[in-house]
Structures are given as C-alpha cells and as structure tokens.
Image (cartoon, rainbow, N blue to C red):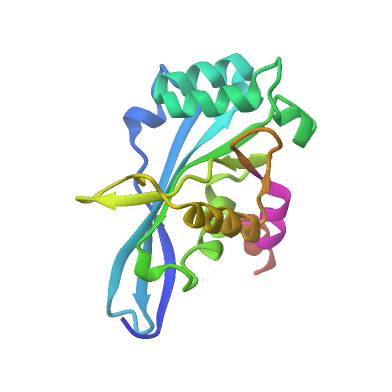
Amino acid sequence: MKDTYYEYRLQPTSSSLYDCHEAPWARYFGADIIACSAGGNEEEVVGHLGGYVLMAEHGGVEGVIDSADAVSGELHRAAHAAYNLDDGWVDLYLGDIYINMFYIETMYIEPEHRSKGAGKDILISFLGKVAYGCSGVFLRPIPLEKVEGRIGRADDPSLELKKRLVSFYKNTGFIEVEDTPFMLLNMDDVYKRTPNEEEEEGDQ
C-alpha cells in the first residue's frame, strides 16, 4: 500500500469485562492499528494496542490489586509490583499511591509496518484518549509475535530484539523502573503532546 498513514480505531469495550463486578477497578481498552492509503480507498489492520486502567484513586490499593487478580495473573503481578504498600514503586516515582495508572498489556505491530510511523505517535495518541485522568503508564517490554492469528509472547526472543523494544519505549518517553522489569511513562508528558478534546472544542 503506497503513501500509507496510520491511525488507531478503538474496539467496542467488552461489557462483561468493563462492568465486571469481580473487577470493578480494572477496565480494559483496546484498539486496532490501521494502515490507510492516502486516498482512503484501502485500509488494513496491522497491529493491536490494549491495556487496563487501574483505578486506585477510587478503589484503593487493595481494590486495584484484587480487581487485577480477577482479570489475569499477569495483571495481578503488575498491579501488585506497582502498588503494594510494602515495596511498590508508584509512590516513589509519582508521589502518591492512590492514583490511577494505565497498564499496557499488548502492543503489537506487524513486522513489515514497523519503523514506519505506526508505533510512537499512535501509542501517544491512544494513551491521550484512553488513559486520560491517569497519572502514569507502565508496561513490561516483552517481545510479542503472532502465531496462527493469535498474539502472544515470542518464543526465545533474541537479546537484540529485547534491546530494540526497550529503545523504542525509551524514545517514546518511558523510563526503566529501577530493580524491576517495568518501564514507566509520566502522563504529564502525554498531555503535553496530545490536545485535550474539551480545550479543542472551546477554541472553535
């Protein structure tokens, strides 16, 4: 596809997950990454973004960790590492433990569309929309692959691939959280790079 540009398209949020009484303080948002032709006549799904808003501002630390546990083991481990009162790092890095955070569970782009503008700008735009009101965004930089249409962790990824992934997130504004496998992006950096929709409407 010549003269390609990229955008994301939010997926309908699963009501069974979004309003799940077992996980009221962990809400999922996902989007497809779309490659579009300049004329708008062609488009193709070339990737996926997805993650959870963790609402400690309303549910408290225990509420967030319990909600994350109801969703998946991975989300529980991530929320516990970030929020737990004994040695969690959210308070250290962002100044408060009772804040909302966004955890990126999935960011995958088809190999032939990488390094073409489908990554950094799309991610920042997506976060500006779905993580609005959060104080930070965090993730584990784990290489992903698609096998038989399903996205999952890459089997035995090379060290070079891991380094490139960490470098991508650093170039997007993430920092490595010391002594953990996580990376963190302060949402203040996102707000500076994405317009507030209410402000845009007020300027018209």
State the residue lying farthest toward the left. 148
- Residue at 40 percent of width and 25 percent of height: 72
Q: Is residue 49 magenta?
A: no
Image: 81 above or below 166: above
Identify which residue is drawn at 50% across, 63% down. Answer: 119
Query: Is residue 25 visible in this depiction of the protein?
Result: no
134 lies left or right of 12: right
Horizontally, residue 161 falls left or right of residue 84, namely left
Name the one closer to the observer, 68 or 23: 68
Q: Quadrant of residue 139?
A: top right
Count of labels shown?
Answer: 0
Query: Is residue 192 found inside the magenta-colored segment of the image?
Result: yes
Give the residues drawn in magenta, as a range.
Answer: 184-196
Q: Is residue 154 left or right of residue 55?
A: left
Q: Quadrant of the C terminus?
A: bottom right
Residue 127 location (% of width, % of height): 56, 51
80 vs 56, nearest the viewer? 80
| Residue 16 at x, y percent in the picture | 32, 28
Residue drawn at 47 percent across, 32 percent down: 27
Taking 160 as reference, is 106 above or below it?
Answer: above
Residue 73 in percent (x, y) is at 42, 23
Q: Is residue 6 above or below residue 133?
A: below
Residue displayed at 30% across by 72% down = 43
Q: Position of residue 112 (x, y in %)?
A: 35, 70
Nearest the viewer among 16 and 148 is 148
Q: Is residue 102 above or below residue 26?
A: below
Q: Quadrant of the N terminus?
A: bottom left
Query: Which residue occupies the foreground of this view, 189 or 140?
Result: 140
Horizontal placement of 94 versus 18: left or right? right
Viewer can see residue 79:
yes
